[in-house]
Image (spheres, rainbow, N blue to C red):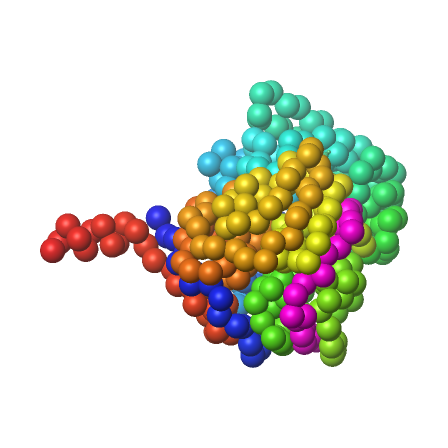
Amino acid sequence: MDKLIINGGKRLGGEISVHGSKNAVLPIMAASLLIKGETVLHNVPNLSDVSASIDILEYLGAKVKREGGNLIINAAEIINNDIPESMMLEMRSSIIFLGSLLARCRQAYMCRPGGCDIGIRPIDLHLEALSALGAMVEERGSCISCIARELRGARLVLSFPSVGATENAIIAATLAKGKTTIINAAREPEICDLADFLNSCGARITGAGEGVIEIDGVDMLHPTQHGIIPDRVLAATYMSAAALNSNELVIKNIIPSHLAPVIPVYMKMGCRLYLNDDELKLVAPKRIKHIKHIKTLPYPGFPTDCQALAAAVLIKARGTSVISEGVFENRFNYAAELNRLGADISVYGRTAIIYGVKRLCGAKLRCTDLRGGAAMVIAALAAEGESTVTQLNHIDRGYEAIEESLASVGADIKRINDEKKECKKKEI
Ligand code: UD1
């Protein structure tokens, strides 16, 4: 098993670049099933979730080629309409194949998806949306079957602006007969990227990024090329690393408007931010200021994915901060690990109280989930002495070689493989 060894206390500085968005590329890869031809995606990050999606596409019969940051998917022929359980359990986003398989094959069989353990994560809104579009949905245990002789446009009202349910609905409605209206749709930038991708193939989607999305169904889509938007959560990860560990850091390849919900929070922490077209410079304060209250909400609220990343900074703030989680039920598992570094976080249900401390000390940490794991890395960079971070499978789902990018701006961080070390010992 891989682990990260971090020697904290080094100042970060220089320039760091943001790769393509995980949460944008995954639904777009699922949507590529709708095109009976080639899809070329640019700015595709090399993540384990992307590999898991490639495995699903290949199982379904698509031909997939990776060339650096480009991904070429040819879904001219689809040979399966089911997804094996082992593939579904790899990540949450596998559920988006439900809408795309249904639209392409009129039948889809799969089990409930896996993903980070941050709450109950039901899929009722996904299934309600597909059934409103004409699918016959059956659940037996964790197995789901979805069959539709024909998909028909409908008026969908989401009781919560779920990102995944909005994506499934958009994808299935793209090839449905007639007009679909999604009310209380998710407004995240990744929804806009999905709509832009589908529109570039001939879909007719308007309103993405707003609460009401309209889709005029079309008979077929044509091949296209599309560049994936930069990963706003990765940008926030670097902002947190810089706020806690640098004098100043330039973060390149961003879309500043996508960071609008997080920028004011870092300014309240005392950071100075200088924004350009596609980059920002963060100048960190001598000591971070506390924040009275952050509440995570659907976009354009403060993103739940950035909650742990903000907490990693606030643990060293002057004063006490409060974070309430408004999206998932159980997203503070990382807090106990940060406390091992000397942080002082108390969790009461969906609220964390963070008492700022002056010093952190290196410790052995285990990633609990993707963003919690990234928060541990950031905090360990600010801890005196050596820390180790294990269970990197969580981090690798969303960060492309996190140790290399952080080392390139001065962090003392390296990845080692325990098994290899063990083998070497035995050889000697
Ligand atoms: C996506 C993101 C994830 C992010 C989340 C919220 C991807 C791959 N993942 O996850 O990183 O944290 O949006 O911004 O894009 N819900 C239901 N029923 C449903 C679906 C969701 O009750 O059918 C609830 C969930 O339990 C949760 C809330 O809605 O409490 C938000 O979930 P949702 O927006 O669907 O998140 P994901 O699409 O899973």
Q: Position of residue 400 (x, y in %)?
A: 50, 61
- Determine if residue 130 is in view: yes
Marker count (numbered): 0
Residue 183: name its quadrant: top right
Residue in front for this viewpoint, 310 or 16: 310
- What residue sits 71% from the left and 50% below the top? 320
Q: Position of residue 185 (x, y in %)?
A: 82, 45
The question of residue 297 being in magenta is answered with yes
Residue in front for this viewpoint, 3 or 142: 3
86 is higher (above) or lower (below) than 212: above
Q: Position of residue 264 (x, y in %)?
A: 79, 63
The question of residue 157 being in magenta is answered with no
- What residue sits 66% from the left and 23% below the top? 138
- What residue sits 20% from the left and 51% below the top? 423
- Determine if residue 105 is in view: no
Q: Position of residue 96 (x, y in %)?
A: 64, 43
- Magenta region, residue range: 278-298
Residue 142: name its quadrant: top right
Q: Residue furthest left?
A: 428
Residue in front for this viewpoint, 144 or 285: 285
Q: Main secondary structure of the magenta part?
A: loop
The C terminus, quarter of image? bottom left
Ligand 1 is located in which of the four quadrants? top right
- What residue sits 68% from the left and 34% below the top? 348
Residue in front for this viewpoint, 66 or 362: 362
Q: Is residue 417 left or right of residue 332?
A: left
